[in-house]
Structure formats: C-alpha cells, structure tokens
Amino acid sequence: MSNVFYGSRLKQVRELMGFTQTELAKKLEKTQAAIAKIESDFTKPSEDTIEKLSSLTGFQPPFFYAPPLDDYPLGSLFFRKRQSVSTKKTNEIHKWGLTIFEIFKRLLEDINPDIKTNISPFADKSPKLAARLLREAFGVSPEAPIKNLTKILETNGVFLFSIPVAYDRFDAFSLWTNNKKSPVIAILATEPVDRLRFSIAHELGHLALHQNTADLADKDSELKADLFASEFLLPEESISTVLRSNITLTSLIQLKPKWGVSIQALIKRAENLGIISKRKSQYMFTQLSKRGWRKKEPASETIPKEKPRLLAQLAEMRYGVPINFSKMAQDFSINAHLLKSIFNGYSCRQDSPNQSSGKVLQGEFGNQISMLRKDQIVS
Ligand SMILES: [Zn+2]
C-alpha cells in the first residue's frame, strides 16, 4: 500500500454510491468544500474521516491508497449523457463499470491471457452487413436464432459487466478500453431478459460500427445500432419467412422463446421489413399499451435467463466454489457484502451446474489456465 491518498478514488467511490459532494459531506460531518479539496488532492483526509468513509461505503482504507485506473472512457455513455439520463446517474453507472473493470484486470493479472476479440471495425459497412459479418466471425450460423448471446460474446472476447444498479431509463452501454483493445458491454443486472438481449445486441452494434466517440455523436448512430441489433438477433432471411402480414399479439408471444426478443422488437422488425404497415404496427403497439404490456410483457419467463460468466469463472479459480468472499474482500479492499452484490449479476458455478455456468475460457487459453491453476493460483 502506498502512503498517497488519491482524491480521485474518493470521487470514484462517492459517485458509485450515488452521492453528491454535499450529500457525502453531510454523512461525514464535513463541508462540501472540504470534500472538493480532498478530491482534487489539495488536502488529505484525517484517519478518522477515512475510517468513517470506509464504514459508510464498504471500501476499505487501502482502496483509497491504490493508484487509480485511467483508461476507462465513457463510450456510448457519452451519448446517453446528452439525452435524458442525469449526470449523477451516468456517473454512478460509469463508476460501477470502472470498479468492475478493475476487479477483472486484477483477476486476469494472475493468468495474463491474450484475450483477442473478433470484432473488426465496420464503420464503412451498413448495419445489416456488419451484423451478418459479425455472425460469421463469431461462428454463428447466418439464419439460426441466437440461444445464449452473453456466452457467444464472452467467448469472442467481449467483456460483459453486470452493474448492480436498477434504473428504468437505461439499459446498457459499451466502450473500447485497454488502448482500444478490449470491447466492453455493461448491462444493468435487473433488466428483463428479452429487453436485455436486444440492448446487448444494440451495444454490440455500437462497438462494431462506432469505434470512435465522434461516430457515436452521429445523429443516426442510435438508429443504426437498432438496425444492427434487429439483423443480428432476427436475420432477415429467416425471420421474414416466420413473420406474416396477419400476425397477432398471440402469434408473437409464441415466437418469443425461440428468438429471445420482446413482442415489441418483433413488431418493429415486421414493420422495418415491410411485412406489416406502419399503421398496423401502431395499432399493435396501442394494443400492447392497453394491456399494460409496454412495461412488462407476458412470456418473458419463457426465455432462459442470461448472465455473464467470465468474471465469476476467474474469481472461482482464485477463491474457490462457492467464491470465498471474505478472502476476496481482503485482497480487493472491498467488503464482502458489496462483492456479493456484484457477483449476483454473474453466473456462478453453484447457481446452475449444468447450464450457463460452463467455462467461457476454452481451448488453448483454457489449458493455460488449468496449468496455472495447479501450480500458481493460491486459494
Ligand atoms: Zn445506443
């Protein structure tokens, strides 16, 4: 542990907890100006303040003395920031992402793998073509439904972060980090699975089509990411043989489990492909609203839940199954309760031994890990 208290660490923790400087000051019996000075490294907090801070937030003192990470841009959050989402909420979500990224990085240090991503820059391609090329690069058949989207992305080098924050005006965000080598998609753990899958595919579209923040600022970038997501999850070739002009809400409910998307996404897709008219689409959306299905659709439980796996897999290799959170808390200076709330969003081995909790790391990389596990990883 260094003897430097980093003001930016205080800011990270404060924003992650969703506090303004004034709110935190009140809880620590300080003034807002005192907090601002500590955050900008003008003054250092007393031991007593650090103690209080630690019991209030769950981050132990050594956390504030560890050099912060710097390469973690806002990515597609930058775009959200200019829309309806408040800056405070944006910061909260961003700081969770940063904190989880740091845990990832440290767990990966042990094995130092060379994780390669199969996402190429497709800025010059149409969303539809990019979606098709990416299916091919990921080894997914061009027309089949995608069963486990999170697993496909993780095995293709996309880091998925599950953020333990509930917020209904926000689904997901994406960014390139690690000197633009690592693609990240961060999702909110509480999102219903049908919406979640579409949000993930939308962010995948941003990663493929808008690798620079400047591309994200393009006014059509949202529309393009949606088109990408529709083609990626519901490829035109196969879905146009399934969706007919006489579709009803009941017939769409039956398609949900197979394609793993919401009724709303299916209606939109039928409209975009010209299978139904805009008028019919509007009519169907009115029907959805009348039944209260805009907010909560029926049959969402027919789609298997998806949770990212890689972070939990790495933690299990080092801290056992189930993960020994007290031991992990000591190493990371983050209390066990907080760590558990993070890992709730991940698929752990004891949750469902036969399903989604299989290995993400496979092949050569998997072998490297098992070799290291025997000799070097201490649990
Ligand atoms: Zn977007």
Image: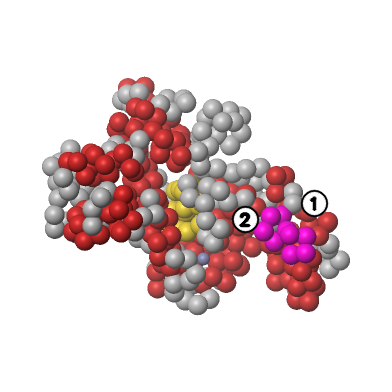
| 294 is within the stretch colored magenta | yes
Give whichever of 67, 276 is nearer the camera.
67
Q: Main SS of the magenta segment? A: loop
Q: Amino acid at mark 1?
A: Gln
Residue 195 shows which numbered tag? 2
Image-based side of 50 in relation to 77, left or right? left
The residue at the point 23 percent across, 53 percent down is: 30
Gap in angstroms between the C-alphas marked 1 and 2: 17 Å
Image-based side of 49 in relation to 286, left or right? left
In the rendered view, would you say 308 is above or below 245? above
Q: Quadrant of residue 37?
A: bottom left
SS class, disc 1: helix
Quarter in which the N terminus is drawn? top left
Residue 110 shows which numbered tag? none
The residue at the point 83 percent across, 63 percent down is: 247
Taking the image as drawn, is residue 95 in sight?
Answer: no
Magenta region: 289-297
